[in-house]
C-alpha cells in the first residue's frame, strides 16, 4: 500500500511523501486520512520557529544542510 502512517511501520523507505500525498496519520487513538504538501515560504517562515521550539535539534539539522538544501516543512491536512 502507498498509504503511510506517521510514527508507524507502514512507511516504505525511499518513498517521497510528496510523490503520493495521501497519508494516514495517527495521533494517540485518532487515525485519519490526510493530504501532505510542502509549506509555502511564508508558512515556513512562520512555522519553523514553532517547530524548533518543540524540537530544537531541527535547527542543528538545518544548519548542517545550509548551503545544500532547505529542510522541507510538510503540512498535513485532514482529507
Image (cartoon, rainbow, N blue to C red):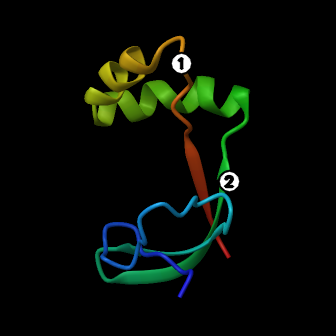
- Please, is residue 30 above or below residue 48 in the view? below
Which label lies toward us, 1 or 2? 1
Q: Quadrant of the C terminus?
A: bottom right
- Dividing the picture into quarters, in which one does residue 67 lie? top right
* Dot placed on the residue nearer the N-terminal end, 1 or 2: 2
Q: Label 2 near label 1: C-beta < 8 Å?
A: no
Q: Residue visible at 71% across and 27% down?
A: 41
Place of residue 46 in the rendered image (x, y in percent of width and height, measured from the top left) = 59, 27
Q: CA distance from mark 1 to mark 2?
A: 21 Å
Place of residue 8 in the rendered image (x, y in percent of width and height, measured from the top left) = 31, 74
- Please, is residue 3 above or below residue 36 in the view? below
- Dividing the picture into quarters, in which one does residue 34 lie? bottom right
Q: Which residue is mark 2?
A: 37
- Please, is residue 50 above or below residue 2 in the view? above
> Helix, strand or loop at disc 2?
strand
Q: Which residue is mark 1?
A: 68
> Helix, strand or loop at disc 1?
loop
Dot 1 alpha-carbon crowd within 10 angstroms: few under 14, some 14 to 19, many 20 or more:
few
Amino acid at each position: 500500500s502507498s498509504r503511510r502512517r506517521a510514527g508507524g511501520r507502514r512507511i516504505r523507505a525511499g518513498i517521497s511523501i510528496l510523490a503520493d500525498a495521501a497519508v494516514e496519520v495517527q495521533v494517540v487513538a485518532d487515525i485519519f486520512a490526510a493530504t501532505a504538501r510542502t509549506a509555502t515560504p511564508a508558512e515556513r517562515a512562520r512555522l519553523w520557529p514553532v517547530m524548533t521550539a518543540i524540537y530544537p535539534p531541527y535547527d542543528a539539522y538545518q544548519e548542517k544542510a545550509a548551503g545544500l538544501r532547505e529542510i522541507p516543512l510538510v503540512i498535513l491536512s485532514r482529507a
